[in-house]
Image (tube, rainbow, N blue to C red):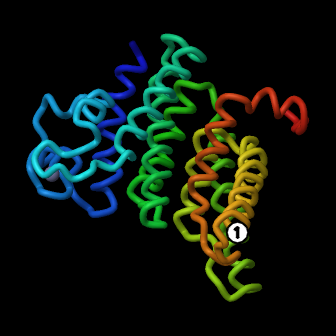
Amino acid sequence: MFALVGAAVGSFLNVCICRIPEDLSIVFPPSRCPHCGHPIRFYDNIPLVSYLLLGGKCRDCREKISPRYPLVEFITAIFAGLLFWKYGLTPAYPVMFLFVCTLIVITFIDLDHQIIPHILTLSGIPIFAVLAVVFLGLTFIDAFLGIMIGAGTLYFVAVYYEALTGREGMGGGDVNLLAMLGAFLGWKALLFILLVSSLLGAVVGVALVVGKGKDMRYAVPFGPFLCAAAVLHLFFGELLNGLFFSLPG
Ligand SMILES: [Zn+2]
Protein backbone atom coordinates (compact mmCIF):
# COMPACT_ATOMS: atom_id res chain seq x y z
CA MET A 1 0.00 0.00 0.00
CA PHE A 2 2.82 2.41 0.88
CA ALA A 3 4.61 1.51 -2.34
CA LEU A 4 1.46 2.49 -4.29
CA VAL A 5 1.38 5.84 -2.54
CA GLY A 6 5.10 6.06 -3.31
CA ALA A 7 4.46 5.59 -7.03
CA ALA A 8 1.97 8.48 -6.96
CA VAL A 9 4.51 10.63 -5.13
CA GLY A 10 7.08 9.60 -7.75
CA SER A 11 4.77 10.96 -10.41
CA PHE A 12 4.91 14.33 -8.62
CA LEU A 13 8.71 14.06 -8.31
CA ASN A 14 8.83 13.77 -12.13
CA VAL A 15 7.09 17.14 -12.32
CA CYS A 16 9.62 18.59 -9.85
CA ILE A 17 12.55 17.17 -11.84
CA CYS A 18 11.28 18.74 -15.07
CA ARG A 19 10.14 22.09 -13.75
CA ILE A 20 12.42 23.15 -10.88
CA PRO A 21 15.48 23.70 -13.14
CA GLU A 22 13.28 25.79 -15.47
CA ASP A 23 11.99 27.88 -12.55
CA LEU A 24 8.43 26.83 -13.36
CA SER A 25 5.62 26.27 -10.88
CA ILE A 26 5.37 22.66 -9.75
CA VAL A 27 1.57 22.83 -9.24
CA PHE A 28 0.33 24.63 -12.33
CA PRO A 29 -0.34 23.99 -15.17
CA PRO A 30 -1.20 20.27 -15.14
CA SER A 31 1.20 17.88 -16.88
CA ARG A 32 1.47 18.06 -20.66
CA CYS A 33 3.11 15.88 -23.24
CA PRO A 34 6.56 17.43 -23.68
CA HIS A 35 6.32 16.72 -27.42
CA CYS A 36 2.85 17.84 -28.58
CA GLY A 37 1.87 19.86 -25.50
CA HIS A 38 -1.48 18.12 -25.13
CA PRO A 39 -2.59 18.05 -21.46
CA ILE A 40 -2.35 14.54 -20.06
CA ARG A 41 -5.76 13.04 -19.30
CA PHE A 42 -6.26 12.00 -15.67
CA TYR A 43 -6.73 8.36 -16.70
CA ASP A 44 -3.43 8.46 -18.60
CA ASN A 45 -1.65 9.81 -15.54
CA ILE A 46 -1.75 6.69 -13.36
CA PRO A 47 1.78 6.00 -12.10
CA LEU A 48 3.52 3.06 -13.85
CA VAL A 49 0.22 1.61 -15.14
CA SER A 50 -0.46 4.29 -17.75
CA TYR A 51 3.01 3.97 -19.22
CA LEU A 52 2.46 0.25 -19.76
CA LEU A 53 -1.12 0.66 -21.08
CA LEU A 54 -0.01 3.35 -23.54
CA GLY A 55 2.92 1.22 -24.65
CA GLY A 56 5.27 4.07 -23.70
CA LYS A 57 3.72 6.44 -26.28
CA CYS A 58 1.73 9.66 -26.04
CA ARG A 59 -1.98 9.02 -26.79
CA ASP A 60 -2.14 12.12 -28.98
CA CYS A 61 1.08 12.34 -30.97
CA ARG A 62 2.33 8.75 -30.50
CA GLU A 63 5.74 10.14 -29.62
CA LYS A 64 7.71 7.95 -27.21
CA ILE A 65 7.42 8.84 -23.53
CA SER A 66 10.78 8.74 -21.77
CA PRO A 67 11.16 5.57 -19.67
CA ARG A 68 12.56 7.96 -17.07
CA TYR A 69 9.01 8.77 -15.89
CA PRO A 70 8.06 5.22 -14.87
CA LEU A 71 11.62 4.69 -13.61
CA VAL A 72 11.34 7.57 -11.13
CA GLU A 73 7.88 6.33 -10.08
CA PHE A 74 9.26 2.84 -9.59
CA ILE A 75 12.29 4.00 -7.55
CA THR A 76 10.06 6.16 -5.35
CA ALA A 77 7.65 3.24 -4.84
CA ILE A 78 10.52 0.95 -3.84
CA PHE A 79 11.83 3.41 -1.26
CA ALA A 80 8.35 4.11 0.12
CA GLY A 81 8.08 0.36 0.74
CA LEU A 82 11.63 -0.17 2.05
CA LEU A 83 11.43 2.78 4.44
CA PHE A 84 8.09 1.54 5.77
CA TRP A 85 9.66 -1.85 6.32
CA LYS A 86 12.54 -0.22 8.23
CA TYR A 87 10.71 2.46 10.21
CA GLY A 88 7.07 1.31 10.34
CA LEU A 89 4.38 3.81 11.24
CA THR A 90 6.59 6.14 13.22
CA PRO A 91 7.16 9.88 12.81
CA ALA A 92 10.57 8.94 11.36
CA TYR A 93 8.87 7.36 8.33
CA PRO A 94 7.47 10.48 6.60
CA VAL A 95 10.62 12.41 7.52
CA MET A 96 12.90 9.80 5.96
CA PHE A 97 10.63 9.52 2.92
CA LEU A 98 10.72 13.30 2.38
CA PHE A 99 14.52 13.17 2.60
CA VAL A 100 14.81 10.33 0.07
CA CYS A 101 12.33 12.06 -2.29
CA THR A 102 14.45 15.22 -2.16
CA LEU A 103 17.53 13.15 -3.03
CA ILE A 104 15.73 11.51 -5.96
CA VAL A 105 14.80 14.93 -7.38
CA ILE A 106 18.35 16.24 -6.88
CA THR A 107 19.86 13.12 -8.49
CA PHE A 108 17.86 13.37 -11.71
CA ILE A 109 18.19 17.15 -12.03
CA ASP A 110 21.97 16.82 -11.60
CA LEU A 111 22.09 14.02 -14.21
CA ASP A 112 20.08 16.14 -16.68
CA HIS A 113 21.57 19.57 -16.16
CA GLN A 114 24.75 19.14 -14.05
CA ILE A 115 23.28 21.52 -11.51
CA ILE A 116 21.84 21.11 -8.05
CA PRO A 117 19.30 23.91 -7.57
CA HIS A 118 20.03 26.04 -4.53
CA ILE A 119 16.33 26.24 -3.82
CA LEU A 120 16.40 22.55 -2.87
CA THR A 121 19.62 22.47 -0.84
CA LEU A 122 19.53 25.89 0.81
CA SER A 123 15.95 25.39 1.97
CA GLY A 124 16.73 21.73 2.72
CA ILE A 125 19.55 22.56 5.16
CA PRO A 126 17.41 24.25 7.86
CA ILE A 127 14.31 22.11 7.18
CA PHE A 128 16.12 18.78 7.43
CA ALA A 129 18.22 19.90 10.41
CA VAL A 130 15.04 20.79 12.34
CA LEU A 131 13.24 17.59 11.28
CA ALA A 132 16.23 15.44 12.32
CA VAL A 133 16.55 17.17 15.70
CA VAL A 134 12.80 17.05 16.44
CA PHE A 135 11.90 13.62 15.07
CA LEU A 136 15.08 11.55 14.80
CA GLY A 137 16.87 12.43 18.01
CA LEU A 138 19.85 14.04 16.31
CA THR A 139 21.46 16.55 18.66
CA PHE A 140 21.58 20.17 17.65
CA ILE A 141 25.39 20.09 17.82
CA ASP A 142 25.49 17.04 15.50
CA ALA A 143 23.34 18.81 12.92
CA PHE A 144 25.26 22.08 13.23
CA LEU A 145 28.65 20.37 12.85
CA GLY A 146 27.20 18.36 9.97
CA ILE A 147 26.37 21.56 8.09
CA MET A 148 29.72 23.21 8.86
CA ILE A 149 31.94 20.19 8.17
CA GLY A 150 29.83 19.13 5.17
CA ALA A 151 30.06 22.50 3.48
CA GLY A 152 33.66 23.06 4.59
CA THR A 153 35.10 19.74 3.40
CA LEU A 154 33.81 19.92 -0.16
CA TYR A 155 34.54 23.63 -0.36
CA PHE A 156 38.23 22.91 0.29
CA VAL A 157 38.23 19.93 -2.07
CA ALA A 158 36.72 22.17 -4.76
CA VAL A 159 39.19 25.01 -4.18
CA TYR A 160 42.25 22.74 -4.15
CA TYR A 161 41.10 20.69 -7.13
CA GLU A 162 40.61 23.81 -9.18
CA ALA A 163 43.96 25.24 -8.04
CA LEU A 164 45.79 22.02 -8.96
CA THR A 165 44.08 21.17 -12.24
CA GLY A 166 42.74 24.52 -13.40
CA ARG A 167 39.38 22.86 -13.98
CA GLU A 168 36.23 23.08 -11.95
CA GLY A 169 35.52 19.59 -10.62
CA MET A 170 33.11 20.23 -7.82
CA GLY A 171 30.40 22.83 -8.05
CA GLY A 172 28.80 24.94 -5.34
CA GLY A 173 25.79 22.66 -5.66
CA ASP A 174 27.80 19.71 -4.32
CA VAL A 175 29.01 21.82 -1.39
CA ASN A 176 25.43 22.75 -0.46
CA LEU A 177 24.25 19.18 -0.94
CA LEU A 178 26.85 17.73 1.45
CA ALA A 179 25.91 20.43 3.98
CA MET A 180 22.28 19.31 3.67
CA LEU A 181 23.24 15.65 4.13
CA GLY A 182 25.30 16.62 7.19
CA ALA A 183 22.39 18.65 8.56
CA PHE A 184 20.09 15.64 8.42
CA LEU A 185 22.41 12.72 9.16
CA GLY A 186 24.85 14.44 11.51
CA TRP A 187 28.55 15.08 11.04
CA LYS A 188 29.58 11.50 11.81
CA ALA A 189 27.82 10.29 8.66
CA LEU A 190 29.99 12.52 6.48
CA LEU A 191 33.06 10.30 6.50
CA PHE A 192 30.94 7.35 5.33
CA ILE A 193 29.25 9.49 2.67
CA LEU A 194 32.50 10.90 1.33
CA LEU A 195 34.22 7.51 1.21
CA VAL A 196 31.31 5.66 -0.38
CA SER A 197 30.45 8.41 -2.89
CA SER A 198 34.10 8.71 -4.01
CA LEU A 199 34.30 4.95 -4.37
CA LEU A 200 31.06 4.77 -6.39
CA GLY A 201 32.14 7.75 -8.47
CA ALA A 202 35.51 6.15 -9.21
CA VAL A 203 33.94 2.82 -10.21
CA VAL A 204 31.38 4.46 -12.51
CA GLY A 205 34.01 6.87 -13.87
CA VAL A 206 36.38 4.04 -14.78
CA ALA A 207 33.50 2.01 -16.24
CA LEU A 208 32.56 4.96 -18.49
CA VAL A 209 36.16 5.38 -19.64
CA VAL A 210 36.65 1.66 -20.31
CA GLY A 211 33.15 0.83 -21.54
CA LYS A 212 32.26 3.88 -23.58
CA GLY A 213 35.68 5.32 -24.30
CA LYS A 214 34.75 8.55 -22.55
CA ASP A 215 37.51 11.02 -21.82
CA MET A 216 38.76 10.74 -18.23
CA ARG A 217 38.03 14.43 -17.83
CA TYR A 218 34.43 13.91 -18.91
CA ALA A 219 32.63 15.40 -15.95
CA VAL A 220 30.36 12.92 -14.25
CA PRO A 221 28.08 14.87 -11.90
CA PHE A 222 28.99 14.03 -8.32
CA GLY A 223 25.58 14.79 -6.77
CA PRO A 224 24.02 11.41 -7.63
CA PHE A 225 26.89 9.61 -5.87
CA LEU A 226 26.50 11.77 -2.77
CA CYS A 227 22.77 10.98 -2.80
CA ALA A 228 23.38 7.24 -3.28
CA ALA A 229 25.89 7.21 -0.42
CA ALA A 230 23.44 9.05 1.85
CA VAL A 231 20.70 6.52 1.08
CA LEU A 232 23.12 3.64 1.71
CA HIS A 233 23.93 5.31 5.02
CA LEU A 234 20.22 5.37 5.93
CA PHE A 235 19.99 1.62 5.48
CA PHE A 236 23.45 0.33 6.34
CA GLY A 237 25.19 3.20 8.12
CA GLU A 238 24.95 1.82 11.63
CA LEU A 239 26.15 -1.58 10.49
CA LEU A 240 29.15 -0.30 8.52
CA ASN A 241 30.05 2.36 11.06
CA GLY A 242 30.28 -0.42 13.63
CA LEU A 243 32.49 -2.51 11.36
CA PHE A 244 34.90 0.06 9.98
CA PHE A 245 34.82 3.36 11.77
CA SER A 246 34.62 3.20 15.53
CA LEU A 247 34.00 6.90 15.83
CA PRO A 248 33.65 8.15 19.39
CA GLY A 249 30.06 8.65 20.54
ZN1 LIG B 1 2.16 14.03 -27.36
Can you say which quadrant of the picture contains the C terminus? Answer: top right
**Residue at the extreme bottom of the image, as rendered:** 166
Q: Residue at x 22, y 58 (%)?
A: 24
Left or right: where 230 falls relative to 237: left
| Image quadrant in which you'd find residue 231 | top right
Asked whether 131 or 79 is in front, the reply is 79
Left or right: where 243 falls relative to 166: right
Provide residue 85's location: percent of width, then percent of height: 56, 14
Say which residue label 1 marks.
209
Label 1 SS? helix
Image height of 166 relative to 94, above or below: below
Q: Residue at x 43, y 27 (%)?
A: 77
Q: Residue at x 33, y 50 (%)?
A: 66
Can you say which quadrant of the picture contains the N terminus? Answer: top left
Left or right: where 243 falls relative to 139: right
Provide residue 137's location: percent of width, then percent of height: 62, 25
| Image quadrant in which you'd find residue 215 | bottom right
Left or right: where 95 falls relative to 55: right
Ligand 1 contact, mark 1 (Cβ < 8 Å):
no
Asked whether 40 or 180 is in front, the reply is 40
Image height of 162 relative to 189, above or below: below
How busy is the neighbourhood of tag 1: few (under 14 within 10 Å), some, or many (20 plus)? Answer: some
Q: Residue at x 90, y 37 (%)?
A: 244
Q: Amino acid at mark 1?
A: Val
Provide residue 9's location: percent of width, then percent of height: 34, 31
